[in-house]
Amino acid sequence: MKKERGKVYYRIAFMIMCFISLVLHFKINDEFFNYEEFSYFTVQSNIFCFIMMAVLLLKEFRGQKINAPVYLYFHGMAVSAILCTAYIYHFSESVNKYDLTEKGLISIPLMDLFGHYIVPVMFLIDWFAFVPKGLVKRNYIFRWLAFPLVYLLCFLSRCNFNENTAFLNVRKYPYPFLNYEKLGSVTFFKYIFGLTMVLLTINTLIYTLDYLINIRQKKSC
């Protein structure tokens, strides 16, 4: 009972942190809603995590089981997406913008601290602390690629089916590695392939850790 209560409190705390992250990204406090942020994978993965956690909490309050494969699949997909967001930001974007080696995380904007560090870490902790182990299927390693694939297809559709006038006040390419006009198709697909490998590595680690923790729990019983 105490663990279940702690899980609920933790997930409520996570939703608060995630909500703060989204408010900071959309700059709602500046008296306008920044629709451009919807084009960023960071924001979409934060929204994905927020919705996933809201569904889990709703199930908890109703006393319903959340061990169904569909919940586990989408929960794991959200973990994969948010970890990819954190990885790319920490090892690519922040390296070129901020001096993390000297000042650490205090050198980055508050919205990036929440969106790329606090939310991913809290969501990962929730996955390993509260989600039943041994239920992740091996094919999820590849099936979890669905979310970034949909993002990529929406991005390409957005760029190709909109007039240039649609990008007067918003960025056409949310990330430099998605600027296929500047990079060329070969370099662009090299980046996509590299990111796919990163995601597959993350997914494999999630599956492997889930498997190993399950084995350890069975031995300790």
Image (cartoon, rainbow, N blue to C red):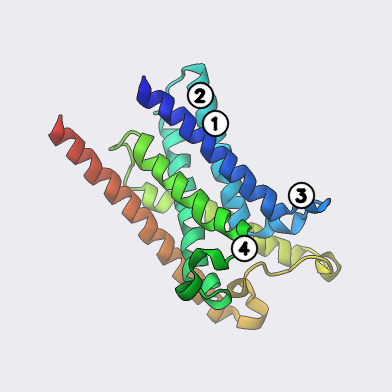
Residue 93 x %, y %: 55, 71
Q: Nearer the viewer, mark 1 or mark 3?
A: 3
CB under 8 Å between discs 1 and 2? yes
Q: Secondary structure at mark 4?
A: loop
Residue at 48% across, 23% down: 60
Q: Amino acid at mark 3?
A: Ile
Instruction: Bin the neighbour count of mark 4 within 10 Å (Cα to Cα): few under 14, some 14-19, many 20 and up.
Output: few
CB under 8 Å between discs 4 and 3? no
Whichever of labels 2 and 4 marks the residue nearer the N terminus, that label is: 2
Whichever of labels 3 and 2 marks the residue nearer the N terminus, that label is: 3
- Please tell me the numbered disc located at residue 28: 3
CB under 8 Å between discs 1 and 4? no
- Please tell me the numbered disc located at residue 59: 2
Q: Nearer the viewer, mark 1 or mark 4?
A: 4
Quadrant of image for the C terminus:
top left
- Please tell me the numbered disc located at residue 55: 1
Q: Is residue 61 above or below residue 101?
A: above
Residue at 66% across, 67% down: 174
Q: Which residue is mark 4?
A: 109
